[in-house]
Structure formats: structure tokens, C-alpha cells
Amino acid sequence: MDPHSRPLFCLKKTIINYNFKLDLIRALAIMGVVAIHVWYPVYSRPDFLGGLSWWLAYVINSVSRVAVPWFLLVSGALLLPRHPRQEIKDVANRLIKRLGLPLVFWSIVYFWWDSFYTGQLHTLLNMMSVLTSGSIFHLYFLVILFGLYLFLPAWRRLKISRTLLLVSFLLGILLYILQFFVFRERTIFNFLTLWVPYLGYFLAGPYLMGLKNVSRGWVWSCWAIAVGLTLISGYINLALLNRGIATFWGIGGTDYFTHWLTPNVIIMSLTGFYWIIHCQFNLSGYLTRAVKSIARVSFGIYLVHPMVINLADKYLGLYLDYGHTRLWWYGSYKYVLVFLLSYLVTVIMIKLPLVKALMGEKKWY
């Protein structure tokens, strides 16, 4: 059994059947997360709309939007089928040590880093407001996991059916519509409820793993249609923004049609996950080792990559407005650099005693 097969916050020391494809999905997901953040300065600019570099950036952004849903699907697929002894104790231990500690530490780090990098001082009141909302920079994903894992014993006792999944996803879609179009900058979620719209993804993981005999052509068609809708709607949305119409453009530069809780991204995420899980393919030994290595440190890369992007922008001259003209080359070069540096930083950190505890590692020494 491969040692890299353990999920980030697993409840047991071993997994009976290691599934390499889950590691592959996790590796692709973290590559997608970094791609979204690296290419954002290009695809979010109305003045770049329609150019070759914009289309390249937006295609990469669109297909990468499965990243966060895939992490949730993998977590559900690995954790929900288990029934460990002393379940409550195990869940509490993982919540505090392997999720809570990194969340607290990196929240403090990124509050400090944001003040250092942008010059905007965060007051205690401001920090408390952000923390209670759950929208803590890119660490909101950890808050979602915290909420889902908090009720893990309950989810394990649910009978996951198509009806349950449909209701869960519809609830997520409706809640996000309410948040995006009605409340806008006033969040309707907090630290303890941010997980609610994402429950469908978590429950769908084991369901899709066990789902058989679905037409591969049908899966491909649904994925292609979802990707096409994402691309077309994104182009229209940015064109409208160029004309001063920001109906589908949220606070903080959020494009409605590329959010994890829109129907097109949900379909894209579920069909892509299903296809990889049930498709037969073989990778070379080198690629297999690379996938396992990236999957092993995916959580650490997620934690550190925004800081790496900021450092590359400031000290390596990779900020977009520094006069870069070949945008396709700029984005590609920056992506490879940021990903490799984030990978190397994580590999080093998880080898250091005590420091590895801040990266969600199980053993601290």
C-alpha cells in the first residue's frame, strides 16, 4: 500500500484499497487552484477581452474551476465510507490538530502578510469580522472542510441517493444566487455555516465512485456543454462589464458563471471526476511518481502559493502592469515558476519538526 494514499485529514492509519486516480485528481486540482490565481490578472481585465492571450487565460480558468469541487469530492470519497472505532474522538483530534492548527496559524500569517504587502492595516475588529464570516482569504476552503468534518459521523450514517444529492446541489445553487444577487457584499454565511452550500460535493464523492455503467459519451457531452457554457457566459459577462454593466460581476472581482456553485461548474466537476475515476489509462513510472508527490503536498501548496505569487510579483518583476506584453508567455512562465517554488517550499516545510504541524501533517516530529 502506498504511503501517499492517505487523505489529508484521514481518520484511519490505513486505507484498504489505494486508488491512484484519487491522487491524480488531487494533483490536477492543486494545479488548477494555482492556475486560477496566476492567470486572474489576465482573464479578469476587460481591456484584454477577445485577444488570443485572454482566450488562453479564460480557457485555463474555466477548466480549472473544478479544482475546489474536486478536493471536496476526493475528501468525501475517502472519508465517508469509513467507520473507525472511537469516531467522535478521532474526528475531534483531526479537527483540532490537522485542520484547526493550520487554519489558526495561516490566518494570522495572511493577516500580517496582507498588511505588509498592501499596506492596509487590519484592526482587531476587522480581523474578528473576517474570521466570524469564514471568508478568510483563500483559507475559506479550510473553513468549509471544518464544517463538513464537524458533522462527519452524521454524514456517514446517511443513505446517499440521487434525490439527496439533487436537493443538496439545488440548495447550494439557490443559496449562492441569494448571496450573489441579493445580499452582494453582505454575507449570509458565517464560520459555522459556510459548508452548507458545498455539502452536495462532499456527499457525491463516494456516490460517483460506486456509480457504474454510465455512458462515456453522455459524460463527455455533459462536460463539453458545461465548459462551453462557462466560456461563452464569461465572454458575455466581461463584455457587459466593459460597457459598465456589472450584474454578473460580484464584489472582489468574482465572475458568477465560474463559481463552484453555479450549475455549469457543478456539472463540469461531477462529470470530470466521474470520467477520471472510471476511465482506464496507464501513466509512465515517472509521471506516476510525480502525481503522487504533488498529491502528497497539495495541501501545503494550497497554503503557501498566494504568498509565492506576491513575492514573484514584487521581487521578480512579474506584476502584470510592469510592462509585460506577451501575455501568454507571461502567464505560462509565471505559472511554472510559482508552482515549482510552492512545491519546493512545501516539501522543505513538511520535513521540519514542529513546522510540519502547521502544514496539516499527522506526525509533528
Image (cartoon, grey):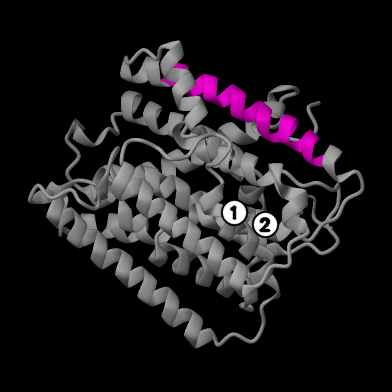
What amino acid is found at the position of numbered circle 1 in the picture?
Leu
Residue 218 picture location, percent across and down: 48, 85
Q: Nearer the viewer, residue 351 or 247?
A: 247
Quarter of the image that includes the N terminus: bottom right
Quarter of the image that includes the C terminus: top right
Which residues are the magenta region?
Answer: 90-113
Q: Secondary structure at mark 1?
A: helix
Q: Residue at image x 33%, y 48%?
A: 180
What amino acid is found at the position of numbered circle 2 in the picture?
Gly
The answer to whether residue 187 is seen in the rendering is yes
Q: Nearer the viewer, residue 141 or 3?
A: 141
Q: 88 above or below 66?
A: above
Query: Do the residues bearing badges 1 and 2 touch, measured as CB atoms within 8 Å?
Result: yes
Q: 358 above or below 43?
A: above
Q: Residue at image x 80%, y 50%?
A: 3
Q: Nearer the viewer, residue 295 or 69?
A: 69
Residue 340 picture location, percent across and down: 50, 41
Residue 72: mark in rendering? 1
| Residue receiving disc 2 | 76
